[in-house]
Image (tube, helix red, strand yellow):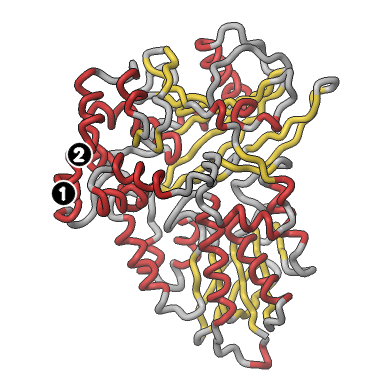
Amino acid sequence: MKRIAIIGGGISGVTAAHELACLQGAGESIQFVLYESSPRLGGAVSTRYANFPGIGPLVIELGPDGWVSEKPWLHELAIELGLSAEIVPSNDAERRTLLLRDGKLEPIPDGMRMMVPLDDDAIRTTSLLSETARHDYLDEPSRADELRKLSSETTGDISVADFLRRHFGEEATRTFAGPLLAGIFGGDIEKLSAPSVMPFFVALERDHGSLIVGLRAQRAARKSSDPAPSIFTTLRTGLASMIDAMAAKLPANSVRTEQPVLAIANNHACWSVTTAAGTELFDSLLIATPAHVTHSLLTPVDQTLAQLHSLPASSTVLVALAYCERIPLPEAFGFLVQQPQPEAHPALLACTFCHNKYPHTTPAAAMLLRVFFGGPNVSSVESLDDNAIAELAQNQLLQLFPDMSAPELAIVQRWPNSLPQYELGHEDKVQQIEQRASMLPGLHLIGNAYRGVGLPDMVHRARTRARAAAQFNSSIPTQTR
């Protein structure tokens, strides 16, 4: 019987446990234990439910609210878990994104993927760019050969800012890429690594030179009979229902919540895990914790590997605001905030109009908004109490929508060090981590610190590494199993 430990009960750890349970059900001789320090599973996946009397129920996501549809792994898992009827596409009829600039909301051009346009007319008519910047955008396809040559000559890493500048110029990069990447990573495009953050576009440049040409070629290659997928997907009952569905299938006594791991050790090709309840031995170990926690766990085992986990991360504060009365808001998924922001509210990053993006979350008469604070000055928000943070969010919304009433419900969720920063040199460091970890047989590292912060990426890595852990044979003495 192979014994496997999983440390960390976020979506990566729970998915790994689910995969091992599937292998167990298929006849594999496996026993596993999932350790989670908090009282609940799911980590950043957290759904809250509320009800407005006489109006109806709300589904409030306090972490991610869905996943990018084109990545199949989470969709496949939802179907596998029997949640097909719960899968809901985003309401792409209102998928526009707005940009808050100089106190005004202006639409980002339609048909953009990240900041790569599919529609020339949308660029020609946007008020967000000067005539020179619009020309730089529209001229990018004509420079395909030059850009392909630049790609072949690029050695080492390149920042998101430098990568996009050579395609679209300084103004477009600052106008679109800064807010978009701040909204996703809470990061600085001058520091974020293009190959790590946007590998799809780096590959487009290598193959086509022009990002616009490459994206249009991919669209043309798709069968005309195939409908374009929605941009995002979620679950009608909330993403936590996926965590619950996986947890319900795990063997009895395999999950130990409120049991923080105090220490791990590598003993002659097997692993020991110590909690307040004692020490157990395992053949394989899956660590699914944030990088700073992984650093602490690994320090007594391998200081070099631990030090490689000194990876930067940023914090975010989410405020969910629910209103009984719906007022006219722009037909959009929400807005991003152009940086730098005014000193009066230095950490506002974005706001999602949940009732537009996912109408099922909110009764027809109500509104549900999610406001995000983050970036380098987020500590000035984190230090406030919940009431002050909710008031800060509401006051900033009132500057844009003065007819908005007071919220009936406000929920504040802090996520400290939750957004890994894939900065320059990240891919090289991940390769070093994987090479060093391979020297410790049975060790597998999963989570969002390595390759991909999105839920599908974490699910894919967790399932792959769980299968690898199940195939490993250690030398635990038979009498101690």
Whether residue 379 sits left or right of residue 41 in the image: it is: left
Point out residue 29 in the picture as x, y percentages from the top left corner. 69, 83
Look at 57% across and 37% down and name the residue there. Answer: 414
- Residue 32 in sight in this render: yes
Point out residue 158 in the picture as x, y percentages from the top left corner. 24, 48
- Circle 2 SS class: helix
1 or 2: tag closer to the N-terminus: 1
Look at 30% across and 21% down and name the residue there. Answer: 124
**Callout 1 crowding tier (Cα within 10 Å): few <14, some 14–19, many ≥20:** some
Q: Quadrant of residue 427?
A: bottom left
Res 102 label:
none
Whether residue 361 sits left or right of residue 420 in the image: it is: right
Point out residue 39 in the picture as x, y percentages from the top left corner. 71, 52
- Circle 1 SS class: helix
Looking at the image, which is closer to me, 141 or 424?
141
Q: Looking at the rendering, in which quadrant would you find the N terminus?
A: bottom right
Res 166 label:
2
| Residue under label 1 | 150
Look at 23% across and 38% down and name the residue there. Answer: 141
Residue with the most extreme front position: 225
Point out residue 272 in the picture as x, y percentages from the top left corner. 58, 77
- Residue contact at pointers 1 and 2, CB within 8 angstroms: yes
Please state which amino acid type lies under the numbered disc 2.
Answer: Arg
- Residue 39 in sight in this render: no
**Is the residue 453 above or below the residue 466 in the image?**
above
